[in-house]
């Protein structure tokens, strides 16, 4: 397989995962709402739905390769914001599962930036 084929397979897999995370935000909004930091108004499901929408739109953009550079940059920034505002504070307060979330979202952000570097 050539590099272009490998890159496309990876890009499609990544977009499908990001899109799935977006759908899961809609399916479990009330369960995820307590994760939204209280210093970000309005609290609750509002930000969960916004985040889910952003994830789904980024996935579509990446899949069809329209505005995928912008989508990758914005997605990467959003994921790093999650690391800094949600997962890192949780880790520092003793949440044993937060480290895996830090690593997951940092890795997904890195992939988003790689996709942005190759996008239109």
Image (cartoon, rainbow, N blue to C red):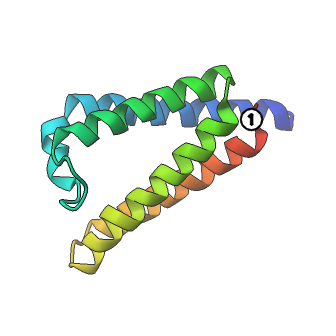
**Residue position marked by numbered label 1 in the rendering:** 119
Considering the numbered disc 1 on the image, is that residue within a helix, a strand or a loop? Answer: loop
* 20 shown above or below 64: below
Q: Nearer the viewer, residue 92 or 9?
A: 92
Badge count: 1
Foreground of the two, 89 or 16: 89
Residue pictured at 23% horizontal, 59% vertical: 37
Label 1, residues with CA under 10 Å away: few <14, some 14-19, many ≥20: some
* Percent coordinates x, y for residue 90 in the rendering: 25, 70
> Which quarter of the picture shows residue 23?
top left
Give left or right: position of 24 versus 79: left
Picture quarter with the C terminus: top right
Of residue 97 and residue 46, the one placed in the foreground of this image is 46
Residue 103: x and y, percent?
Answer: 45, 64
Q: Is residue 11 above or below residue 97?
A: above
Residue at screen point 27% across, 65% down: 97
- Asked if residue 84 is positioned above or below residue 73 in the image, the reply reads below
Judge left or right: residue 117 versus residue 94: right
Left or right: where does residue 73 sit relative to residue 77? right
Report the quarter where the N terminus lies. Answer: top right
Q: Residue 119, image x and y in percent?
A: 74, 35
**Residue at left offset 75%, top offset 45%:** 117
**Residue 10 appears in the figure:** no
Q: Report x, y in % for residue 78.
A: 47, 50
Residue 28 visible within the image: yes
User: Horizontal placement of 81 versus 63: left or right?
Assistant: left
Measuring 55% from the left and 50% from the top, which residue is drawn there?
A: 76
């Amino acid at each position: 397989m050539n590099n272009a084929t490998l890159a496309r397979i990876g890009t499609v897999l990544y977009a499908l995962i990001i899109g799935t995370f977006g759908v899961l935000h809609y399916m479990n909004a009330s369960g995820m709402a307590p994760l939204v930091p209280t210093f970000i108004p309005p609290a609750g499901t509002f930000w969960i739905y916004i985040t889910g929408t952003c994830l789904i739109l980024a996935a579509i953009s990446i899949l069809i390769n329209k505005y995928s550079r912008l989508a990758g940059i914005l997605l990467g920034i959003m994921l790093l914001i999650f690391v800094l505002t949600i997962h890192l504070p949780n880790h520092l307060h003793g949440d044993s599962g937060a480290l895996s979330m830090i690593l997951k979202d940092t890795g997904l952000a890195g992939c988003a930036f790689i996709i942005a570097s190759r996008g239109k």
